[in-house]
Amino acid sequence: MKTRKPARGRRRGRPVVDAGDDVRGKLLDAAVGLYAEQGIAATTVAQVARHAGVTGAMVHYYFKNREQLTDAVFLERVLRFRDLVWHEDEDFQPTQPKDADLLLGLLIRRVIAATEELPWLPNLWVKEVLNESGLLRERLMKHFPVQQLQGVAQAVAREQRAGRMNRELQPLLAVVSVFGLTLMLLATRKVWGRLPGAVELDNTKLERHIVSLLQNGWNGRKS
């Protein structure tokens, strides 16, 4: 009696994929893109799999559920923005006495540069951080670089006491305004760019506009 060979089929465990594929990375990239486009709550695991070009089983192999996927997106994609903007180097040391104008200008430049690497960030910020029901807000607050932010705010306060900055400014809000103005203009670029009289601004010109507005205000103080 011949022994019957077992039928060949898909083995249990990890789905078969090309060994050279970074499947997990593709899933995170697909997820963060969809989150920015339509929001986290409206994004299904099936959509993430389809955009990554894999099966739903592949998503569940790497992430038990959507919550775990969202955690990974935040830690491995969104926090990259924090690191790009707030990392300290010779020019940017917010916890050391520095010129506030220099620190704020560098923050604006870094935010814009970071969004060139992470083009989905402005839309995601509006949908999932600024929005009252945003699902990334609390995650971000737990990882916010509070010490660096306070360092820049203290630099603003020192400049105010020395009479070199507007005393009506709220130091903390001056720093928050850098992110609010820069990210909102980037997120709504396709909207204001279509308004009558709007001019096309590349990121360099947009940076100059934001720096000029925050430094000089409405009255156009001449430098």
Image (cartoon, rainbow, N blue to C red):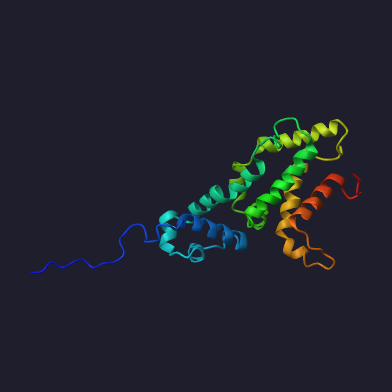
Residue positioned 74% across, 61% down in the render: 189
Name the spot of residue 81 as percent of width and height, x first. Answer: 63, 48
In the image, residue 198 sits, relative to residue 166, either above or below, namely below
Q: Quadrant of the N terminus?
A: bottom left
Name the spot of residue 39 as percent of width and height, x first. Answer: 60, 60
Total marks drawn?
Answer: 0
Residue positioned 71% across, 30% down in the render: 96
Residue ranking furthest to the left: 1
Q: Quadrant of residue 203?
A: bottom right
Name the spot of residue 54 as percent of width and height, x first. Answer: 45, 64
Q: Is residue 211 visible?
A: yes
Q: Of 200 and 75, which appears nearest the observer? A: 200
Name the spot of residue 191 as percent of width and height, x first. Answer: 75, 65
Q: Quadrant of residue 17?
A: bottom left
Left or right of 221 in this view: 126: left
Q: Is residue 132 visible?
A: no
Q: Quadrant of the C terminus?
A: top right
Residue positioned 47% across, 65% down in the render: 53
In the image, residue 62 sits, relative to residue 159, either above or below, namely below
Residue positioned 85% across, 37% down in the render: 165
Q: Of 80 and 153, which appears nearest the observer? A: 80
